[in-house]
Image (cartoon, grey):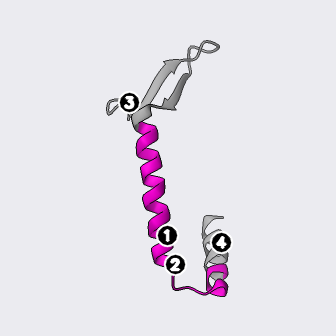
Amino acid sequence: MEKNRLIEKRANPRDARVSLVKLSSSGQTLFENAITVFEHSAEQLTKDLTARQLQTLSQLLSRIAN
């Protein structure tokens, strides 16, 4: 990711064994675009579900995640 300039890495002034990493401006843009695509895809996949079906789906996904 650093090679592709998606993140910026710098030394931690408090601990030389640790590096600090943050998204570069390009990385932030890519992240924001990915979130937009994800949200649109999720809306398309669930648009025909009822409120009860959405609730059931949410409960099932929570079980898988835990």
Q: Which residue is drawn at 61% across and 87% down?
A: 50
Front residue of this view, candidates 40 and 13 = 40
Q: Which of 44 and 17 is in front in this view?
A: 44
How many numbered circles are shown?
A: 4
Q: Which amino acid does label 2 sit on?
A: Thr
Dot 3: element: loop
Tag 3: residue type?
Glu
Marked residue nearer the N-terminal end (1 or 4): 1
Contact, CB < 8 Å: mark 4 with mark 2?
Answer: no
Disc 1 residue crowd, few under 14, some 14–19, many 20+, Cα 10 Å: few
Query: Viewer-proximal residue, 9 or 30?
Result: 30
Q: Which residue lies furthest to the left in this view?
A: 4
Mark 3 or mark 2, earlier in chain: 3
Q: Give the answer, above or below, for where 12 lies relative to 66.
A: above
Residue displayed at 65% across by 69% down:
62
What is the three-letter code of the residue carrying label 4?
A: Arg
Distance Cα–Cα, label 1 vs label 2? 6 Å
Q: Quadrant of the N terminus?
A: top left
The disc label shown at residue 42, or none: 1
Residue bounds of the magenta highlight: 27-55
Instruction: Single out the mark in the foreground, 4 or 3.
Output: 3
Q: How crowded is mark 3: few (under 14 residues within 10 Å), some or many (20 or more)?
A: few
Which mark is first along the chain, 3 or 4?
3
- Say which element carries label 2: helix
